[in-house]
């Protein structure tokens, strides 16, 4: 087993990798991307290799060079295998992990056992699988599918390979499968539900493909990054929080799956079910209401498909000991009138203070009400009224102020004090008529081009939604950006992807004069 | 557009990449693996980014460091975008290439246009697509499939994005879809066909997943790497050659597709058709005989499937102006008695000299004979006899000597002068009986573990094949290796994957005492 001297390479590549000199690689009959095992003392780790092909080594050569007798360690690997510059490390060729064969089995259309699925998830989390292999697994999930036994195994394996939090008491949760812009309902549901005395420890994500994740929106009002012990304290004190789940290591395989799903724009159904439910199981959720936005441009386009998905969530939940009810909501246009972190935080705050759009109130109270019915706080059919009363009475707003303060934000903030992008542009109705389409994907693309979610004040405001009557020249969509260049970019996107359509509006003139 | 100073990083990563300092990346709102465009003077190139996250830069820090204001250039990119250390390079975020959307379209099950497929192939060849995106395309080919219009477009696009060779006269070719070990028939067919006066410019590949590619086997007897002008001279002089096609840049997309197919163990049917036919179209083949090994453990297991594939090759050929006939051959066990570069070269040479196994003679002359019939040199049904006569008369051996000499090898080499691995082990029959199975995949795995194809003398020799009667203790399989450690490895593989089965042989004793 050759012993090589470690050389730290300060580059993050997204995979656990090392660099060998071509000469050493040839000696071990290794090619680029083959796997090796590194060991020193008792520790050892798997890595994939890049090659440094400079044979002649001199002192003054350029950076990145790995000479014969050296092994370059990328930063990604250093976390798992801490080693100092110059330290000796043993290297040996490593066999392909057995989970590669299980992935091939799934690719051939076969059913996997619990043990096989667990091994795939473990090897994903330890980076023993390459991104290409993880992609093959996810694409096989997409095209071959998985039965409910496999999905249950996948969910449990994702929980077992990460942290879990036991709050010591029953907790409830809400979740949306996503895909609809402007879905700031969590900022209303959590205080409504907590105001009724339920415990709702809401961890949410930052935007992956959307202009604002719930964590991005909440962060406008208060910090969202906490340790597990801080979260326990937050829940005990106010009965609810809205935190970022990313650093808690709950079902960490999810992030690694997303890193592959995202560039490929895939969202395999078995993976969606497992990822959502694993994060709930990991924090001991006993009762869950699930929002399934349905409609043109949402993740689920037909009610038939939405009902099928709802039943899958309910069955998976019952196998895991989580009671699930699903709300099929309208996802064919944005929720409320705003898209983007600061714009959405402002709208949520206004709604809690009694000045919000009806669609947002209806959706939030319906989902909160479902949790009241499931936990017996309200009779069947009485949940939404109870939620509306909590909202109307100001108790939800009061609870939200506590939550903001508890998380370290300013509870006295007024909606108008939330800073919005100063660079703005209004897209007006080119003709009289009814708004017939608000295009989700165009709205998303415009808000992202305007800088959301990184530029918190950027986004889109809708003055009219589907079915509204507008007159020529009325504002329909306003773009907000923090920088002129981003506003320009967003306008470019809007001209290529019209965000709305007025019934009777001329789509194109042919010939163009 | 920020201007950064180039810093050469002497690492080959397999993707066109650069390294930015975290600070610069953040300023451009770039994340790991996002795309950027680099430009200087008139030249520009796309690359994907890794991140160097050291903010404080000092002179004595470790290698690989890319400081704010610098851009690290990996060796892979340097080929396309030559730049000197310290040179200024402009960097701007680059949009996702449009072919990513076309790949998604295929993933959704839609049919692609010629323009869309051409763009995908172009972006593959220019490395504008990541390996993950190429993988998504290939898996969509595998699971969604392609119609013949799409396959034709794919073939033509693969030709258009590479070199072509015009020999100025009609040329014929033979090809095997592969998958059967020991298939050294090319070393017989090329001299038989050339001896009859046809022109057969045979480019072949090195082993990808097998113990020996035709180029690896031929290389035992003569060099196989030539430039295009050398190939022209070789063809003119002897009417045939057996060269490695890898460096000729014919349909170069193929190598990039294989780099993804190989680790995933996929071989999508549309891609197989397009890759094979593109390499034929690129060198102007007018007449092609295609060997489709069929049987247990081959790429195609049933005759029904083999016939379907044959018809697809014939239809694709007719669209491309290539006359194709397919030979369905038996692929359920190795061809001849040897597997591994030197062992196979020896067996081929012996067969040309008149001392070869019948199965190898039958297969080679049948395929060569088909070419004689297609070109009118022999009447329908008379091709194989003509080929056998050329072989029997010694004309084929004489032609092979010319080919070896022409390619720079020793034409006088005797079979026994070919060096074979000295470390050997015989697996004997554990009982009397008939050989009922010779397992292709086990034979392949054993030969590779023994060191093939890199160790030319390593491989496997079969003393008995399916249907042979053997007595207890008779040799059945002999393993050849160049190194003791490799022989041990091969024996380990053989004990886990038995390479043969004798009818009536006890498979396992239960309980094991």
Image: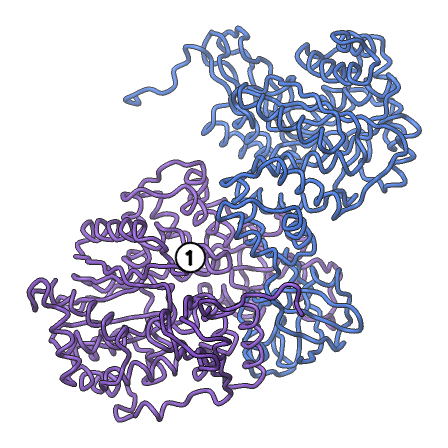
Chain colours: A purple, B blue
| Image position, residue B241 (x, y; %) | 83, 29
Q: Which residue is mark 1?
A: A257
Q: Is residue A433 visible in this depiction of the protein?
A: yes
The crowding category of the residue bearing disc 1, from other C-alpha atoms within 10 Å (few below 14, some 14 to 19, many at least 20), is many
For disc 1, the chain is A
Nearest the viewer among A274 and B189 is A274
- Residue A164, by quadrant, is bottom left
Nearest the viewer among A21 and B337 is B337
Q: Secondary structure at mark 1?
A: helix
B275 up-or-down from B99: above or below: above
Q: Is residue A8 visible in this depiction of the protein?
A: no
Nearest the viewer among B388 and A460 is A460
| Image position, residue B455 (x, y; %) | 67, 35
Residue at (52, 43) in percent of width and height = B264
Residue at (77, 7) in percent of width and height = B382
How many numbered discs sit on the rendered protein?
Answer: 1
B178 left or right of A107? Answer: right
| Image position, residue B151 (x, y; %) | 63, 38
Nearest the viewer among A77 and A70 is A77
- Residue A288, by quadrant, is bottom left
A464 up-or-down from B406: above or below: below
A176 left or right of A240? Answer: right
């Amino acid at each position: 087993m050759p012993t090589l001297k470690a050389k730290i390479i300060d580059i993050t590549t997204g995979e656990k990798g090392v660099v060998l000199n071509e000469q050493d690689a040839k000696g071990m009959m290794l090619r680029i991307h083959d796997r090796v095992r590194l060991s020193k003392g008792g520790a050892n780790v798997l890595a994939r290799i890049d090659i440094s092909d400079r044979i002649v080594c001199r002192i003054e050569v350029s950076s990145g060079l790995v000479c014969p007798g050296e092994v370059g360690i990328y930063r990604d690997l250093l976390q798992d295998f801490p080693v100092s510059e110059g330290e000796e490390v043993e290297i040996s060729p490593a066999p392909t992990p057995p989970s590669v064969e299980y992935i091939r089995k799934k690719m051939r259309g076969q059913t996997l056992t619990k043990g096989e699925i667990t091994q795939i998830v473990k090897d994903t989390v330890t980076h023993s699988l390459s991104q290409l292999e993880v992609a093959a697994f996810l694409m096989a999930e997409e095209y071959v599918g998985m039965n409910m036994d496999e999905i249950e195994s996948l969910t449990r394996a994702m929980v077992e390979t990460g942290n879990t939090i036991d709050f010591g008491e029953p907790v409830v949760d809400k979740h949306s499968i996503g895909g609809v812009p402007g879905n700031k309902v969590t900022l209303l549901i959590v205080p409504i539900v907590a105001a009724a005395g339920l415990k709702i420890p809401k961890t949410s994500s930052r935007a992956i493909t959307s202009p604002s994740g719930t964590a991005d929106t909440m962060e406008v009002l208060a910090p969202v990054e906490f340790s597990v012990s801080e979260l326990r304290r937050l829940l005990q004190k106010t009965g609810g929080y809205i935190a970022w789940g990313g650093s808690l290591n709950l079902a960490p395989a999810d992030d690694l799956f997303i890193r592959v799903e995202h560039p490929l724009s895939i969202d395999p159904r078995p993976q969606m079910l497992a990822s959502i439910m694993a994060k709930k199981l990991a924090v001991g959720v006993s009762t869950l209401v699930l929002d399934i936005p349905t409609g043109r441009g949402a993740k689920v386009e037909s009610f038939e498909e939405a009902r099928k998905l709802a039943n899958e969530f309910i069955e998976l939940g019952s196998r895991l000991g989580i009671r699930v009810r699903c709300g099929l909501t309208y996802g064919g246009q944005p929720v409320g009138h705003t898209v983007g972190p600061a714009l959405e935080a402002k709208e949520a705050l206004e709604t809690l203070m009694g000045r919000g759009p009806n669609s947002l109130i209806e959706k939030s109270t319906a989902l909160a009400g479902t949790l009241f019915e499931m936990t017996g706080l309200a009779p069947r059919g009485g949940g939404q009224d109870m939620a509306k009363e909590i909202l109307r009475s100001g108790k939800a707003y009061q609870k939200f102020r506590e939550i903001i303060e508890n998380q370290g934000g300013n509870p006295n903030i007024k909606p108008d004090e939330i800073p919005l992008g100063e660079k703005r542009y209004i897209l007006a109705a080119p003709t009289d008529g009814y708004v017939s389409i608000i295009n989700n994907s165009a709205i998303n693309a415009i808000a992202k081009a305007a800088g959301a979610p990184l530029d918190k004040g950027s986004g889109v405001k809708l003055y009219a939604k589907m079915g509204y009557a507008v007159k020529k020249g009325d504002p329909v969509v306003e773009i907000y950006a923090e920088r002129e260049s981003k506003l320009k970019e967003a306008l470019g996107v809007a001209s290529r992807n019209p965000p709305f359509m007025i019934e009777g509006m001329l789509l194109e003139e042919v010939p163009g004069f």
